[in-house]
Image (cartoon, rainbow, N blue to C red):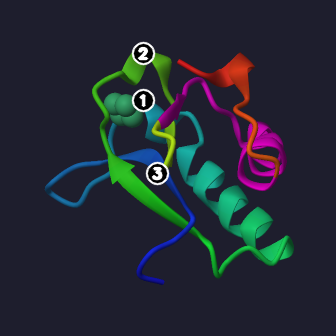
Amino acid sequence: MVNPKYHIFVCTSCRVNGKQQGLCYSKDSVQIVNNFMEEIDERDLSSEVMVTNTGCFGVCSSGPIVVVYPEGTWYGNVSPDDVEEIVEKHIEGGEIVTRLQI
Ligand code: FES
């Protein structure tokens, strides 16, 4: 997929040394990535939505952080249970989930 309609970035606190250390990682961000991949797959959206885990966005105290492009929407304090709502409202419905927006 070269040009996805949506690209979801999830901070998993990846460091340049390859280790995952940091607040987002300690607050289930790997589970958040997995939940996004499952939701995208279950809703048959994998041809238009890409999910990527990232390093620190520099706002750890608001983590776990999820950033959605093309809008450039930043979500904070995201939990694995919030993923379904983000996919349903934002990715499928085009509506930003304002309660999680930072
Ligand atoms: S570790 Fe996720 S924003 Fe810093």
Q: Is 97 included in the stretch rendered in magenta?
A: no
Residue occupying the point 52% across, 34% down: 73
Q: Which corner quadrant of the image does residue 13 belong to?
A: top left
Q: How far from the left and from the top, in percent, is residue 37? A: 67, 67
Q: Which mark is residue 85?
A: none
Mark 2, residues whose alpha carbon is within 10 Å: few (<14), some, or many (≥20)? few
Secondary structure that dominates the magenta span: helix
Q: CA distance from mark 1 to mark 2?
A: 7 Å
Q: CA distance from mark 3 to mark 1?
A: 16 Å
Q: Which corner quadrant of the image does residue 44 belong to?
A: bottom right
Q: Is residue 81 above or below residue 34?
A: above
Residue occupying the point 67% across, 78% down: 46
Q: Is mark 2 within 8 Å of ligand 1?
A: no
Q: Amino acid at mark 1?
A: Leu
Relative horizontal placement of residue 52, taking residue 92 as reference (left or right)? left
> Which residue has dot 2 on it?
61
> Do the numbered discs 1 and 2 sit on residues whose CB atoms are within 8 Å?
yes
Mark 3, residues whose alpha carbon is within 10 Å: few (<14), some, or many (≥20)? some
> Which residue has dot 1 on it?
23
> Which residue has dot 3 on it?
9
Residue occupying the point 45% across, 62% down: 52
Residue 65 in sight here: no
Q: How far from the left and from the top, in percent, is residue 69? A: 49, 49
**Ligand 1 rendered quadrant:** top left
Relative horizontal placement of residue 91, taking residue 78 as reference (left or right)? right
Q: Nearer the viewer, mark 3 or mark 1?
A: 3
Q: Is mark 1 within 8 Å of ligand 1?
A: yes
Q: Secondary structure at mark 3?
A: strand
Q: Amino acid at mark 3?
A: Phe
Q: CA distance from mark 3 to mark 2?
A: 17 Å
